[in-house]
Amino acid sequence: MSRTAQSNEHGPTPSEPLPSAQPPIVPEPLRIGEPSSAAGGVPAVLSSMKHAWEEMGVARSTQTLLRVNQPHGFDCPGCAWPDPAHRSAFEFCENGAKAVAEEATTARVTPEFFQQWSLVDLAAQTDHWLGKQGRLTHPMVLREGATHYEPLSWDEAFALIASELHALGSPDEACFYTSGRTSNEAAFLYQLFVRRFGTNNLPDCSNMCHESSGTALNETVGIGKGTVTLEDFEKARVIVVIGQNPGTNHPRMLTALEAAKHQGCRILSINPLPETGLQRFKHPQTVRGVLGGGTALADLFLQVRINGDVALLQGLGKALLEREAKRPGSVVARDFVEGQTLGFEAYAAHLAGVSWDDVVEQSGIPREQIETAADWLAETDQVIWCWAMGLTQHRNAVGNIQELVNLALLRGSIGKPGAGLCPVRGHSNVQGDRTMGIWEKPPPAFLDALEREFGFTPPRHHGHDVVGAIQAMHAGEVKVFFALGGNFLSATPDTELTAEALRRTRLTVHVSTKLNRAHLVTGRRALILPCLGRTERDLQAGGPQFVTVENSMGVVHASRGTLPPASEHLLSEPVLVARLARAVLGPADALPWESLVEDYDRVRDLIARTIPGFTDFNRRVRERGGFALPNGPREGRFTTRDGKGHFTVHEMPRLALEPGQLLMMTIRTHDQYNTTVYGLHDRYRGIHNGRRVVLLNAEDMKELGVKAGQEVDLTSHFEGQRRVARKFVVVAYDIPRRCAATYFPEANVLVPLGSMAEKSRTPTSKSVVISLAPSVELPALASGA
Ligand SMILES: Nc1nc2c(c(=O)[nH]1)N[C@H]1C(S)=C(S)[C@@H](COP(=O)(O)OP(=O)(O)OC[C@H]3O[C@@H](n4cnc5c(=O)[nH]c(N)nc54)[C@H](O)[C@@H]3O)O[C@H]1N2
Ligand SMILES: Nc1nc2c(c(=O)[nH]1)N[C@H]1C(S)=C(S)[C@@H](COP(=O)(O)OP(=O)(O)OC[C@H]3O[C@@H](n4cnc5c(=O)[nH]c(N)nc54)[C@H](O)[C@@H]3O)O[C@H]1N2
Ligand SMILES: [Mo]
């Protein structure tokens, strides 16, 4: 396997293969069992312990896991679900334990490792294998034409980036990506540096995630965030979980749902799949949960067709308005609607024209079930709407979310206890990063504040989002790509096209904790810059530092690592950004970058002076549990320009499939964190030892003439373009007709770059039109050809 490192001035010869952008297709001894009947319980405890012990050993596991989400510990790098006021000693879940183990592993990726492994050889390994190699220890460079990374000093790394950035024709020829784990302090400094450099090219993972929620909510209620707190879950009478799989992706949310159930709250689950976590939950950290039968969660499960949500939500609205017509004043929150909202008449008129036949056909839900759900919504206004990627990644994603806002406005279910909107965020600080100004379309007021505080003229024209960045790199308009975290190559749509876009740049830079495929598909030159993770001690000249994050419910709190750093060569993200800024902006730049990061309180003072809601930041963040940011709609005040909540009207999208075509969603297994593959078990869905599967309805399988266990090639269809992914194993599953499911990121190659949500430009990762055909053996091709 090992080849010696070598570089030459002329780049790889044409016959040399390029590192592959997609994981290799390896034989997987797939085992299909029954989906689990309950989430959590003993298997969850065993699974957390297995991952933790394998990566960290027993003593380190105990020491580390006891610090997760504690007042003096670190924020779990898993998800953005908030911490309860009364925490238990074990305030983490199975998948949080895996996220922590992934970072706190004792394995290391050293310069010797990179000397042994060429990029082509590394790219032939699976994503699971890449992650298992451990933490990155040194800054590494891929010189022009080289086949291997080699170590370099931090100063050399920053000088190299500075020279490439200075050589650009305009600052807009560089893009600066952010993944949502970056702390508030690092994010604030980063956007400040990027804008001082002169561009708003700040794409982030949010563009692929909850951008549709932000767009939908800003337009209708005036804030791009949710309006509930964790306490609202204790008071709600109905909680709707739509397009979200909390059992896997936000397991601690199940605790809140279980508590709500015990208070008599009903739970309505709307999903194409009967996700285990929503059916029954055994709390893995209570005796009752581990030994008992657990709690049945969902009272009603509406098995909606993929992208049938607008139809379903309009059906619910229609059913509510029919009840109102029978008993005027019984359902529509008249005072609220008249006093605080606009657009109700147009909405009601539109629903009057929607036919029940269309609702039932397009949603796939029988009318009786819609009527039952409508009865619940008519009985109480204490309703919380929770959603995630099942709503945000469709062409009509903004419409999906605005239709549920319509229902909340109709019943007056915003701005009162036990009611409101709850987009459940993904990355642990994705919401905070946006608050700090990581946004390619910064609001003018934000730029005005930067201008006032820092005395420079920030660029005003909008920058590239994720899709725009890929297109611009592909067109040769963006020549330097810098990523603060994440795995841009594998997380984005259209893997092969994105790979080509990255390869056309002059320089790609990744600030990372772990090795991933984005390090292997590079510009002419590339850097890997290793940084501290959440779990690690951050010691600067001013003493031990902590950082801050904002959770899904707008609460800002501290996160303090305790483990010794994985290597003495790591920089913290704030320090890394400050040193980069100095190298690029030069000694004359007036900001005291070096001293700012000696003590992060100084960064927080700048945040307090520029960002609304952060007054007295340093004092308030030291209070137990942190503090909540202002939220108009939560406080009963819409913050739209006219101060009103807005009803909106949307055409019902119609399923338009040709014979043989299916609508495919790309989803997460129980054993991954986005592109990080922890293991090969999707335990709750009963799929073991493999990820290259396609879940199909048994009736569709018959019609298409495919059998369980058979290998098929998937072709996606978009505007006359075709994309192919080879060798997926067919699994018969409880999924609506003409729907299919595959796993992210293996199926990203099928997601067309041009297929985006209207307004939010989020790739439509849950609405991919595919057809399938039995796999045929192709003659072996050189990889990358
Ligand atoms: N362990 C773990 N935790 C995570 C992550 C992880 O990868 N692993 N990722 C984090 C991130 S960044 C995010 S954004 C969140 C993601 O959290 P989720 O949004 O829960 O993640 P997905 O697996 O994409 O699941 C989408 C869910 O929506 C359903 N769905 C798909 N299409 C439709 C539709 O058209 N209508 C409806 N009603 N439902 C639909 C799917 O069946 C699935 O249950 O989780 C965060 N937490
Ligand atoms: N088809 C399809 N595509 C999708 C989705 C989907 O549902 N379907 N979901 C989308 C969503 S919701 C999201 S959020 C994106 C995710 O996109 P990204 O955020 O870009 O991807 P991740 O896989 O979360 O990034 C993992 C990498 O982050 C690095 N990392 C981890 N911790 C740290 C840290 O503390 N600091 C730094 N600097 N680096 C760190 C590690 O090197 C790791 O390899 O993917 C999107 N892509
Ligand atoms: Mo996400």
Image: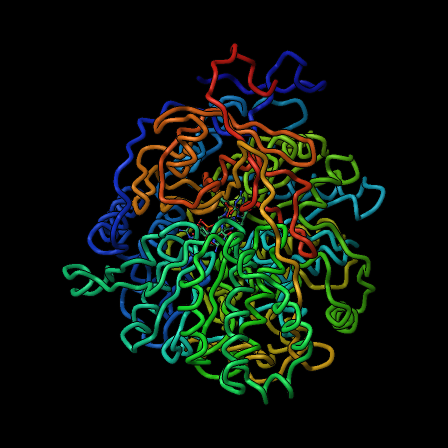
Q: Residue at x 65, y 61 (%)?
A: 189
- Left or right of residue 310: residue 79: left
Taking the view exactly as shown, the residue that stands out farthest to the left is 291
Measured from the top left, where is residue 722 in percent x and y?
A: 63, 29
Of 26 and 526, nearer the camera is: 26
Q: Residue at x 61, y 14 (%)?
A: 16
Asked if residue 659 is positioned above or below residue 484 in the image, the reply reads above
Is residue 123 in view?
A: no
Disc count in the image? Answer: 0
Residue 747: % across, % down? 51, 35
Depth check: 26 or 5 in front?
Answer: 26
Res 65 → quadrant: bottom left
The correct choice, above or below, for 748 with respect to 308 in the image is above
Q: How is the image coloured?
A: rainbow
Percent across and percent down for residue 153 are: 59, 39
Q: Is residue 286 visible?
A: yes
Q: Residue at x 45, y 61 (%)?
A: 367
Nearest the eye: 399 or 196:
399
Q: Is residue 710 left or right of residue 178?
A: left
From the viewer's perspective, is residue 530 above or below residue 388? above
